[in-house]
Image (cartoon, rainbow, N blue to C red):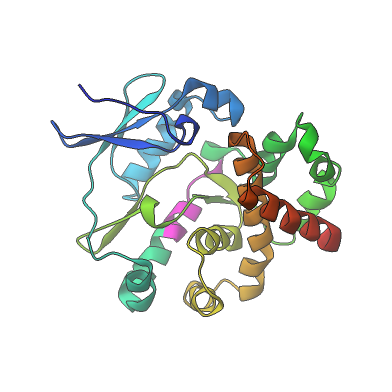
Amino acid sequence: MITLKDQNEGFSSVYKNLTNQKIYKVYNQSSFTKFHRRRLSDFKIIYNETYKLKLSPKHKIISNSIIEIDELKTDPKFSINKLLNEEKLLKNFLAQIRKVNSIDRRIIKRNLIDEIYNYINNNSKHQKIYQKIDKLQKYLKTYRQDIVCHGDLHLKNIYLKEKRIFFLDWDYCVISSPGYELAMFAYLEKLNEKQINKLSIYSKISLREISHYLPICQLLDYLYLSTISKKNDKKIRSLKIEVEKFILNNL
């Protein structure tokens, strides 16, 4: 019997049952309301679509809070440097992102502004952001908001198997822009200016568009961390300062 321990509010933890080589993703039921997430049954169409497009391994919803995922063994040498420095691999990665972007947005429905609004609504400590929600929406719409984005691409959610790339963890998929998708990847992996510029060149998404959404990634990080943490730790305080600077200078 596998022992399941709650991590990250039970929202993004994966567990492996060694007896049958499956991965189980387990959700704390409170996370569905705390993070304004859809029920797992609502994700069934998303999982079927991403599997059909060969974007992710097969997912099977086995209860109201547990997903069974076919195991993928990633290349042990897979790294950010490998991804960005091997041209064929980088092109493959960006091609997979374009497949994500091509998913029918009616399947996803949730816009990026909805994601932000759900964090700040009815939360007194985010009133400054709430008061700027209309201007924030206008800021987002500087670039088109009409494609599906994975919304949480980082190395732990990217698998390389026999030169094919797969994505895991579709909880944060939203409708936004190509620049947002790449900005979130750059933010989560702490890419430097040279690496971001390379992404821009190979993806043909302007550096200006990617850079435009980097503060939004920082804002989402702040909102997420301040939601799950009961303590006002150093990272949250630092993010709050940067978010307030962004609001002051851009909204």
Magenta stretch, main secondary structure, is helix
The residue segment tinted magenta is 97-105
- Give the percent coordinates (x, y) of residue 176: 62, 52
Query: Does residue 153 appear to the left or right of 128 in the view shown?
Result: left
- Give the percent coordinates (x, y) of residue 105: 55, 44
Number of marks drawn: 0
State the residue at coordinates (13%, 31%). 19
State the residue at coordinates (38%, 64%). 93
State the residue at coordinates (59%, 47%). 175
The residue nearer to you, when weighing 97 against 22, is 22
Query: Does residue 164 appear to the left or right of 31 in the view shown?
Result: left
State the residue at coordinates (39%, 37%). 13
Magenta stretch: includes residue 6: no
| Placement of the N terminus among the 4 image quadrants | top left
- Give the percent coordinates (x, y) of residue 24: 30, 32
Query: Which of the 4 image quadrants contains residue 120?
Result: top right
